[in-house]
Image (spheres, rainbow, N blue to C red):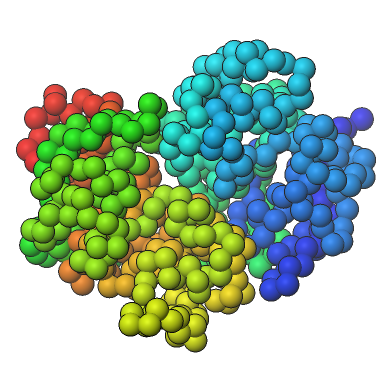
Amino acid sequence: MTAPPRLELLGITKQYPAVRANDGVALTVAPGQIHAVLGENGAGKSTMMKIIYGAVKPDAGEIRWNGQSVQIASPAHARALGISMVYQHFSLFDTLTAAENVWLGLDKAMSLAQVIERIRAVAGEYGLDVDPLRPVHSLSVGERQRVEIVRALLTNPKLLILDEPTSVLTPQAVEKLFVTLRKLSANGCSILYISHKLDEIRALCHHCTVLRGGKVTGEVDPTKETNASLSRLMIGAEPPQLQHRPAKLGEVALAVRGLALPKEDPFGTTLERIGFEVRAGEIVGIAGVSGNGQQELMAALSGEDRRAPAGSVTLFGQDIAQASPMARRRQGLHFVPEERLGRGAVPTLSLAHNVLLTRTEGVNRRTGWLDMAAIRAQSAELIRRFNVKAGGPESAAKSLSGGNLQKYLVGREIAANPKLLIVSQPTWGVDVGAAAQIRGELLALRDAGCALLVVSEELDELFEICDRLVVIAQGRVSPSIATKDATIERIGAWMSGLWERDHVEA
């Protein structure tokens, strides 16, 4: 007899106050199948995954697990069935170590010491660089993602749900992850794979279900599709081609000279003799594997860390090394952090109130009173201009999908007309259409004379929008190289700190 499907969804529907996230969704996943779920931001993918994992209860429909109808009451119930999930927004406790976080998600058959050994074994087997003893608060986004993946693998899942698993991984790390996933698939584990990276879906997945507006709009074999055909299925069109004109360089906007900072956290990275410039009218990209000093450098440039030596960071010739974030914003420096929820936005506040984190147009500077009508209008304009799917300015930040919140936060800073914009991971977890829109907005800002510094672990993104590149490795930065003179292989080698061999002039 033929084995029943590992998972079946029949007529799954979920209504929220402002949107119907899932509308009669049907899905069938076979044992050992790597099944992609594709859709633009807000299409209902994450809601569907949360229903399967027991974190959200559907309003209607049926779930069958190995042919048997089930009602998955909670994530603990899902894990007992053999379902594990790695969320796009991580669910880790900052004050605990990686091992302690993993231990919390397991039954207590193993001691903490045994869990530490298992983490090291699994991480080594699958090429995932995880130190089980490090506190989570000291980890970069990419390192936290590895902890989540290892935690899921330790449960020996029969169905593994991955929501944007490669969004902050390097190409080398992605290849290692794919080896892991193919091995799991060969051993009978089914995988539900959410990604906006069409090349990955075509290279990895056996089947693909496409969602649009909460409904299934197609099922295809991704190996027989092109990026263009998948884009049309997902967003109804191909993403627009970016117009990358030659840079018209202006004055030096940001100059970093001899920036050295001892690490504050025992697991952080010490910055050593950092030096580079960003001129008006250009985009400079910073490439590197997460955990090599990106967080520390961004904190020093944004004003979150004000220990930088006097004169080591200047903005249009003015020393800002020890200036506050507000003082830097007043001089034209705006910043988009890599962490959307908790740093870029307050999760429980409305989109309108989140504008006030970095913008003060709706504040009466003399009295301090807020003009909420003006602030809501400003928020509504951001939602319209950047095509953000949200219930309106009063919607809580945490109610948006990751990609839609990213569009809103990037838009908030772009609309402030910055003189220097620093962006970390600009299109993390964003669909192809939205990613093209964000990158297009960054290029338009550059063409208008703004200076931009973009930190990204997406090498393809850096090559697409940047005029020059530098690489950060072990707290040091390479000389700059014109993007037209760089290759993926060369930048990959520099990520290991090997740029001295090339003797490239800055």
Q: With respect to residue 446, does 94 lie above or below?
A: above
Between 343 and 219, the one nearer to me in the picture: 343
- The residue lying toward the viewer, choosing from 233 and 491, is 491
| 350 up-or-down from 255: above or below | below
Q: Position of residue 167 (x, y in %)?
A: 48, 44
Task: Single out the residue that lies furthest toward the front.
Answer: 367
* x and y, in percent, of residue 265 in the image: 37, 31
* Residue 68 at x, y percent in the picture: 92, 40
Quick one: 39 or 129, which is closer to the camera? Answer: 129
Q: Position of residue 359 (x, y in %)?
A: 37, 71
Left or right placement of residue 16 versus residue 123 in this view? right
- Which quadrant, please, contains the C terminus? top left
At 50% from the left and 71% from the top, the residue drawn is 353
Q: Residue at x 47, y 77 (%)?
A: 379
Location of the N terminus (image quadrant): top right
- Residue name at image x 71 percent, y 35 percent: 84
Residue 242 visible in the current orientation: no
Q: Furthest-bottom residue in view?
A: 373
Look at the image and tell me whether residue 427 can be seen. yes
